[in-house]
């Protein structure tokens, strides 16, 4: 696999950093999750399934678990020994915490110039907001992204933590860039990635009015937010929904001709917004005449961009997700998420192993050269 031989120390919690470690583990990296005595919070988020919460299963599988008190002198010594033998460190502490512990990038670089140190945060390691705590929702609010989900009303709580996902995705890219560059220079680097920076970088499709006119977009008149008849959600007869998800004219022509309304093709050439309302009104009336599944079967034959709107449990049951390895059954019989990266020559091999809290502590310490007596003393002093 692509990342065989790469060792990652993952000190992060919740979603962004653990997702980075998971992605690397799926493709061959050895990922050691360093946990406090309290343990990773997602171990306890949600009902346990065969002993592990689904959140934990799908962000922490395939990793080793090492319990370590990073505030103790012995814990710091163990961490630095591990860091010297590793390639990547991921942390999500508030900016400055690792430095105050004596375990930041500069400290590690002194003993291992090739280390790639990735620090994840809400607002970045520098700037006036660096010390402000936040999770995903705060970043969505501050970037203006949350306001885009209001569409004329009050902002609503997002169902997906987009800032977390953006942060993790950017971190993987940056880490792999640094590892690739290290092949030529022998030098690692410190990667500062924030939720606000990465999420804001995802907004080019909606910035036209902001840049050109200095105002926020009127969502009802924007192509991707309800202004286009062929990029919209429509209610069906059974109070479910389908979406049209492609406003290119070839899709418009195919569907409107099949529905007997070629006269509305020119309407869909008009600017987004009220000018396309005649086509939207027709489509609303039309989709209300059949059930979601009936439309699904019919639309599948029309060559248009569309999809039925599935509930999450319905989506989980789709055979295509198992055929493509996106849902994989573990040895305990529980299905988990797989990897979305499908290499032809060296495909990932997602491990379904789930480590109990501190399950690998003894083996890792022994590998570092700690004998039985030393390991027992560390346990007694609650260093491990």
Image (cartoon, helix red, strand yellow):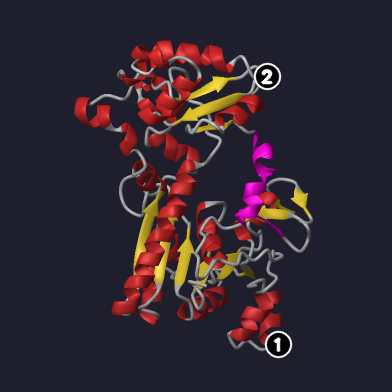
Answer yes or no: do the residues labelled 1 and 2 have beta carbons within 8 Å?
Answer: no
Numbered circle sitting on residue 238: 2
Q: Which residue is mark 1?
A: 372
Query: How far apart in space, not on screen, are marks 1 and 2 (Cα)?
Result: 66 Å
Secondary structure state at the residue bearing disc 2: loop
Residue bounds of the magenta highlight: 311-329
Numbered circle sitting on residue 70: none
Secondary structure state at the residue bearing disc 1: helix
Give the quarter of the figure containing the C terminus.
bottom right
The answer to whether 81 appears left or right of 381 in the picture is left
Nearer to us in this view, 21 or 291: 291
On screen, 215 above or below 9? above
Can you give x and y, in whole percent of width and height, for residue 177 in the image?
35, 65
292 is within the stretch colored magenta:
no
Residue at image point 44% right, 64% down: 98
Would residue 147 be visible to someone looking at this image? no
Can you give x and y, in whole percent of width and height, for residue 75 in the image?
56, 74
Tell me the mark number nearer the camera, choosing from 1 and 2.
Answer: 2
Q: How many marks?
A: 2
- Mark 2 closeness class: few <14, some 14–19, many ≥20 residues within 10 Å: few
| Residue 33, picture quadrant | bottom right
316 is within the stretch colored magenta:
yes
Can you give x and y, in whole percent of width and height, for residue 140 in the image?
43, 37
Residue at image point 56% right, 35% down: 159
């Amino acid at each position: 696999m692509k990342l065989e031989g790469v060792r990652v120390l993952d000190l992060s919690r919740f979603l962004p950093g653990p997702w980075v470690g998971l992605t690397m583990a799926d493709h061959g990296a050895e990922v050691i999750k360093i946990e406090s005595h309290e343990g990773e919070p997602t171990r306890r988020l949600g009902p346990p399934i065969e002993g592990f919460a689904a959140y934990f299963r799908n962000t922490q599988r395939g990793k080793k678990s090492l319990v370590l008190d990073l505030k103790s002198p012995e814990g710091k010594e163990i961490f630095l020994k591990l860091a010297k033998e590793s390639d990547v460190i991921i942390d999500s502490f508030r900016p400055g915490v690792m430095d105050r512990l004596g375990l930041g990038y500069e400290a590690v670089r002194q003993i291992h110039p090739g280390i790639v140190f990735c620090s994840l945060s809400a607002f970045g390691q520098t700037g006036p907001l660096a010390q402000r705590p936040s999770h995903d929702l705060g970043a969505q609010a501050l970037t203006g992204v949350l306001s885009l989900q209001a569409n004329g009303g009050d902002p609503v709580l997002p169902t997906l933590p987009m800032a977390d996902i953006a942060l993790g995705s950017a971190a993987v890219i940056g880490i792999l860039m640094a590892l690739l560059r290290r092949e030529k220079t022998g030098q690692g680097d410190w990667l500062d990635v924030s939720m606000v920076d990465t999420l804001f970088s995802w907004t080019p499709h909606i910035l036209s009015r902001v840049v050109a006119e200095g105002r926020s977009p009127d969502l009802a008149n924007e192509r991707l937010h309800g202004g286009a008849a062929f990029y919209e959600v429509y209610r069906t007869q059974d109070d479910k929904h389908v979406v049209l998800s492609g406003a290119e004219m070839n899709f418009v022509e195919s569907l409107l001709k099949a529905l007997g309304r070629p006269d509305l093709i020119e309407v869909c050439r008009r600017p987004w917004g009220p000018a396309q309302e005649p086509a939207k009104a027709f489509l609303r009336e039309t989709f209300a005449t059949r059930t979601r599944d009936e439309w699904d079967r019919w639309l599948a034959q029309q060559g248009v961009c569309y999809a039925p709107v599935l509930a999450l449990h319905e989506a989980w049951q789709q055979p295509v997700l198992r055929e493509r390895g996106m849902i994989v059954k573990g040895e305990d019989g529980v299905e988990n998420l797989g990897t979305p990266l499908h290499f032809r020559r060296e495909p990932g091999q997602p491990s379904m192993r789930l480590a109990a809290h501190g399950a690998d502590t003894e083996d890792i310490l022994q590998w570092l050269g700690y004998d039985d007596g030393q390991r027992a003393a560390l346990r007694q002093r609650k260093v491990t």
